Image (cartoon, rainbow, N blue to C red):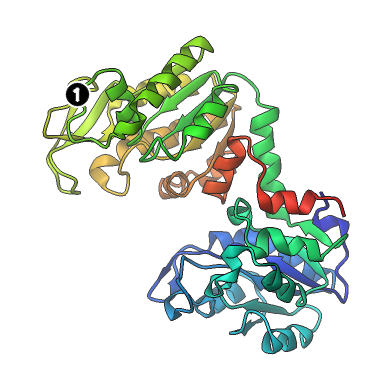
Amino acid sequence: MKTIDDFHFKDKTALVRVDFNVPLKDGKVTDNTRIRRAKPTIDKIMNDGGKAVLMSHLGRPKGPDPKYSLKQIVDEVEKVLGRKVHFSEQITGPEAEAKAAALKPGEILLLENLRFDPREKKGDPEFARQLARLGDIYVNDAFGTAHRAHASTAVIARYFPGRKAAGYLLADEIKHINQVLHHARHPFTAIIGGAKISSKIGVIENLLNLVDNLVIVGGMAYTFLKALGYETGRSLVEEDYVDTARNIMEKAKVNNIRLVLPVDIVVADQFDPAARTRIVKADQIPADWMGLDIGPETARIIHDVLMPSKTIVWNGPAGVFEWDKFAEGTKKIAESVARATEKGAYSLVGGGDSVAAIEKYGLADKVSYISTGGGAMLEMLEGKTLPGIKALEEDE
């Protein structure tokens, strides 16, 4: 697979798939991380004397919708890149083509939200062909959407034989995830959290072939506790996956993997930030209460598992960390991952909530790598080939 360093962009127009799916409040960007992560790729094109046409999605619109217009982020993109950014309200067609053709070296054009056109998600070849008219070289730097077989991420590459490349961010993501999958130092510990086991089964099953320790936290842990025969009260349990949890526990045992489940729980009498709380043993959750975080003893056990680890993957919080009463478990994990990294471990953190937690506690620069793509990272950790990456690797 070629990377952006294999090309010189002087007088060329790079058609760059970026991931500017950033959070907005009142039309203003509240977190510009994804824009900042794309800057090195865009800078390389500009410094070569090239031009760039940027394309991205934002949110999940059902069609054109001002609430999801990329016009709202133009000011922020200009601020981060330090360059004038032109905007095209048309994604393809005469207006977009005219604006792309009018670019001078060092100039940037941002297209309107790709998902305003239903053909993007359908992976429509004609839509991809129309987009392809806007550039000389295709660059994919949107790892967060690399697992989608959309027109701008997978199909479009076929129109750039010999003229397609991974941007710095995409290449970096692949390198760091492959580090974990194929070159991990041991002991290797994976912490998998979040709400549901159903969305993480593939990842967990693949990790069972790789790790020495598997830590299960978050809402999904209660399905495992149920599989052990514990009373889980009104905690989140996926009844259809209790047998799956049991099978995972059995496979961990056969593979001699240490499986860490919560031993104590912060329970609440209702799903509310102001709920009454108490700490109970994992097998003593009251019938009318629900578990919303791990307890201090579980956090200590996880810390002790992480300290000697040489490779760590973390995806998913330990509880409802957005609410202060249920944030301590996630905070303790973040601190322990940072401490283990300081001691020499390689740590990969990914998934929106895990990243938000690491940043919330000011520890983003204390881990080895933060992945920008939750779903894409999970699918790579499952061992899947991502359509957006395969499209760059296919024979020219």
Query: Could you tell me residue 194's position as x and y percent?
Result: 39, 40
Res 318 → quadrant = top left
Residue at image position (71%, 74%) is 131
Residue at image position (29%, 32%) is 239
Query: Could you tell me residue 101's position as x and y percent?
Result: 78, 85
Q: Which residue is mark 1?
A: 231
Q: Is residue 370 visible?
A: no
Q: Would residue 143 be found to the left or right of residue 366 on screen? A: right
Q: Is residue 224 above or below residue 255?
A: below
Res 366 → quadrant = top right
Q: Is residue 175 visible?
A: yes
Q: Is residue 122 above or below residue 254?
A: below
Query: Could you tell me residue 141's position as x and y percent?
Result: 68, 58
Q: Would residue 123 be found to the left or right of residue 334 on screen? A: right
Badge 1 amino acid:
Glu
In the picture, which quadrant includes the C terminus?
bottom right
Q: Is residue 221 above or below residue 16?
A: above
Residue toward you, 227 or 55? 227
SS label for mark 1: loop
Res 223 → quadrant = top left
Residue at image position (63%, 77%) is 111
How would you rate the neighbour count of disc 1 (Cα within 10 Å): few for under 14, some for 14-19, many for 20 or more? some
Query: Could you tell me residue 370's position as x and y percent?
Result: 56, 45
Q: How many marks?
A: 1
